[in-house]
Image (cartoon, rainbow, N blue to C red):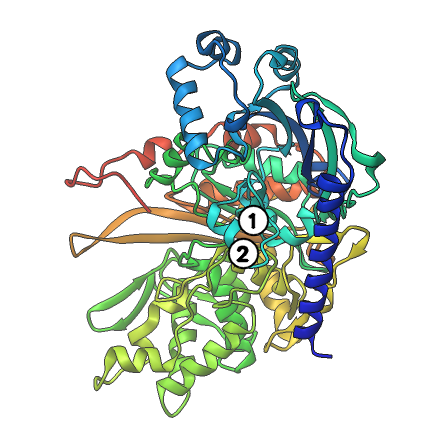
Amino acid sequence: MTSKKLLIILTAVISLVLIFNLFNIQIINTWGINYTDRITIRTQKVKPERGEIYDRYGNLLVTNKVIYNLMVIPNELEKFDTIKFAQTIGISTSDLKNQIQQAKNYSSFLSSEIRTDLSDAASVSLNEKLWQYPGFYLEKNLVRDYKTTAAYSLLGYTNEVTQDEINQQNSPYSLRDHIGRSGIEKQYESQLKGHKGVRYFLVDKFNREISSYEKGEFDIPIEKAENLTLTIDKNLQQYGFDLMNDKRGAIVAIEPQSGEVLALISRPGYDSDSLQRSKDRKYFNSLYNDTLNRPFYNRALQAEYAPGSTFKVLNGLIGLHEKIVTTQTNFTCNYGYQYAPNAHMACRCPLGTRNNITQSILKSCNSFHAKLYTQLIDSERSPEIAVNKWNHHVMSFGMGDYLNYDLPQGSSGFIPNGDYYSKIYDDFFWTGSSIISNAIGQGEILVTPMQLANFTAAVANRGFYYKPHFVKKIGQTPTQFNDSKRITTIDSIHFGPIIEGMHLTITNGTARIANVEAIDICGKSGTVENFILLHGKKTQLTDHSVFIAFAPKDDPKVAIAVYVENGYWSARWAAPIASLMIEKYLTGQIQRKNLENRMLEGSLVAEYLKPLSGTGFLINQ
């Protein structure tokens, strides 16, 4: 038997059962001659409680709370004092009349909402008076109760289904059901919603429930929803959220040994609880129209940024693997690199400085990496072949890839290949020097904070990573994401010199502010030039602050990427925030209170409100 025939037969059987039940309820089981004057049988779909969500340690992130909606069935209304009733339910008389008219226009026989989100106390008070107003009744409803305001970018939100969603074929939804709109709530909707049951019960002419019908014999039981256990550390998530107060940007922290995401912060954002009230459009519209802060834009997963000097780590690994350089190679830096007669890439290394690969990471030497990259691109018989080889290595670290994590949002970033540059330059001759900005992560490369954190995890693991993911268990069943081990194209022997340079960056280099006593942190700073096209002209704005790190060096437990928009240089915001997150996660406390207070209280709001020079426009990334 085909699956299609089986579905038709199953649908027919269920329909016959429901028809029999209704016939039995309405025709066979009468309640005397005056039945319709005394008792009404109502059918109610019973919604299971939406599944709860916990963090990795069992701390509650999302549960449910009971609210009550005041409903009306227009055909059952009798004459009543509209002024008094409007005062009782706390709305104006005109609003009450308008809502009753809208309910009639919708259906005289079906129920419609008059007021929503009534508390327990308000519903008890109102229920004592409803017997005076036939046609009105209270409907119990469950909505989400978010126990943290720090995880909206991860959890998402729910609100009521639309009529179009109800009308879809085989839709499990009905009026006033809630559905996940983003984040975990959306991605795991089928597990979190469960399946409805049906309840038959008796009410008197005052709409007061008397009892269940036939002691519940014909009721259809609900199927419970699944609870979710996330990989997130609730305390770390809250801490990162607080550190990013009054800043735009993102933090992603990953456990390298499993790919479990420990924290995902995107700021600014929204209040998941307020977005449940879909009929109140003011809050939603205020978020939607905020084109400066863009709260619905998940910067951790969707924002595509240049990686800046953090990318020197990857280019260094590729250079070692392709034997463009060795650990013995030294390049001289003269305050930068003159790569063409009228083209100079500046660097802070003093005149005559000689750096090897480890020192190039420690000092973030532009000259070393510019020379490495141009030699890499010019090492093949054509630059297209060399760029494609470089692209292949970069992509093996999860760059330029959505990564297929278990959230519905995300961007793939952009890693250019040989064809891309051949089209740009067309018939013009081009070499490594033509695309030299890629050497320091300032060319056409675009990455997301999630990709940067995942790349850092791969470096911490010395050549492999697990697919990043957010759900640890569905019910009591562990997820299987940590089975998806991805091996990079770089041999593991090449990571040692690079990691040593990252460690020296913290102890003696550009990110000494990130040094934590008794924790061997490895990191790489990045100060990213920030340009926009304004009236067709390339305009430079305040640099972005970016930092990647992992710790401990020899037994990595956490890998992190921090991106702070318009944050000036790395050591000003991103590096301190990353190190505080690492210290908090690994030790559970913070010793550097002065630094912590500076990050918690620091604000970039004034920076974001600066008008663009001579334009009157605000900074809008």
Q: Residue at horizontal 35%, vertical 66%? A: 444
Q: CA distance from mark 1 to mark 2?
A: 6 Å
The answer to whether 614 is drawn above or below residue 462 in the figure is above
* Secondary structure beneath label 2: loop
Quadrant into which the N terminus falls: bottom right
Disc 1 marks a residue whose amino acid type is Gly
Residue beneath disc 1: 183
Amino acid type at circle 2 is: Pro
Q: Residue furthest front?
A: 33
| Image x and y of residue 501, in percent | 57, 61
From the top left corner, tell me how far across and down residue 247 is, in percent: 44, 37
- Contact (Cβ within 8 Å) of mark 1 with mark 2: yes
Q: Residues within 10 Å of mark 2 (few under 14, many from 20)?
A: some
Do we see residue 213 in this rendering? yes
Q: Position of residue 550 (x, y in %)?
A: 63, 54
Q: Which mark is residue 408?
A: 2
> Could you say which disc has been placed on residue 97 in the image?
none
| Label 1 vs 2, first from the N-terminus | 1
Left or right of 13, for residue 397: left
